[in-house]
Image (cartoon, grey):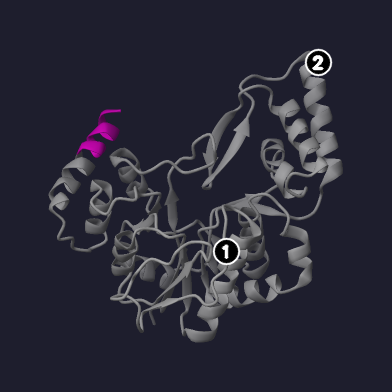
Amino acid sequence: MPVKLQFIVMSSGEDNRILSQLIDSLAPWPVLIHQDASRARPPLPTMIGQRVQWVRPALATGWGDWGFASAILQSMGQALREGSFDYLQLLSPSCLPIRPIADLIAHVTHGNCDHHVDAFDLGRDRDTWMSFAWRAYAPTASERQRLLSRLRRWYFGDAPELEQQHSMSVMHRRHDAVGANALRAAAAVAMTRALGQADCVVGSVWFGASRAVCERMVQMAACGEFRARFESLTMVDELLIPTLLRHAGRRAGPSNHSVSPFDEDGHPVVIDPLLLVRAQASGRFFARKFRADPNDACRLTALSWAGCRSESPASAQAMPLADEARAQIVLG
């Protein structure tokens, strides 16, 4: 029997036309919207009803802080209390489906995974460890974090390369360390390992999970142990959510999201035609991050791929842009 879906959208005051596009593309499935309590709630009088509800009470959220992680768990708790879903998917207003929702339902129904997320063990290799330990094992702005950040610079040297893996940016040295630099890099690894050894997973926050996994995540997060471990960390959502998923579900699959590459400040760049075609070629079901313009050609193309109709006059430009991007890939 096909699964019943539930969507949660984490909003921070986006244009209601952007939210409307996303919510319409998810029909007929229920949507909970968590609106950042520190920002004005967008007017959505025609959308709020039996299928679309606000999360209550809403929490103040920031970028990657405890408030955002708490708001995700608060939203999950309301979905569990009020909904009868089998599978929950977390989204942002900058996400859109790039395939029909029926494809996601078939994937979840016939697959054998408890949850879908892009994540990896912090200790899988040295580069991963040194990329993320500075924010996994020290409170934000603490002396300990400053020390770990300095050790990270010792290890990677000047201007390290960034590689996107599993929707995260991992750092690499541009050149092999030799001589004194090699000694400094080895010392940095040894000192970093001495400062933090707890089990931890790092990854994207945009996950999908079965109801049973969601129930276990909410139960575990309610324990003081998890709050004490994660509350004060930098970008806590990318540590807490994947770690909870790892403990709550045994069978993990790749994320349902294709996340566009990150800039130097850690934000995903907006999707252009080439990135959109690459997202579709990934075989995933959603893409992020779309431009916050309801008439953006990439948005309209994605909606057409998902089987959604748009009355916008810009929709005629959508498919040619995508075709041009495909040609760029073929021609290299």
In this picture, residue 14 sits left or right of residue 58: left
| Residue 26 location (% of width, % of height) | 33, 69
**Which residue is at the front of the view, 230 or 43?**
43
**Which residue is at the front of the view, 274 or 34?**
34
Hey, what amino acid is under mark 2?
Ala
- The magenta span reads 324-332
Q: Earlier in the sequence, mark 1 or mark 2?
A: 1
* Vertical placement of residue 132 versus 204, above or below: above
Q: Is residue 237 visible?
A: yes
Marker disc for residue 287: none
Residue of label 1: 60
Residue of label 2: 180
Q: Which residue reaches farthest top? A: 179
Instruction: Estimate how packed mark 2 is, as few (under 14), some (14 to 19) or many (20 or more) residues with alpha carbons within 10 Å.
Output: few
Q: Main secondary structure of the magenta part?
A: helix
Distance from the alpha carbon under mark 1 to that under mark 2: 47 Å
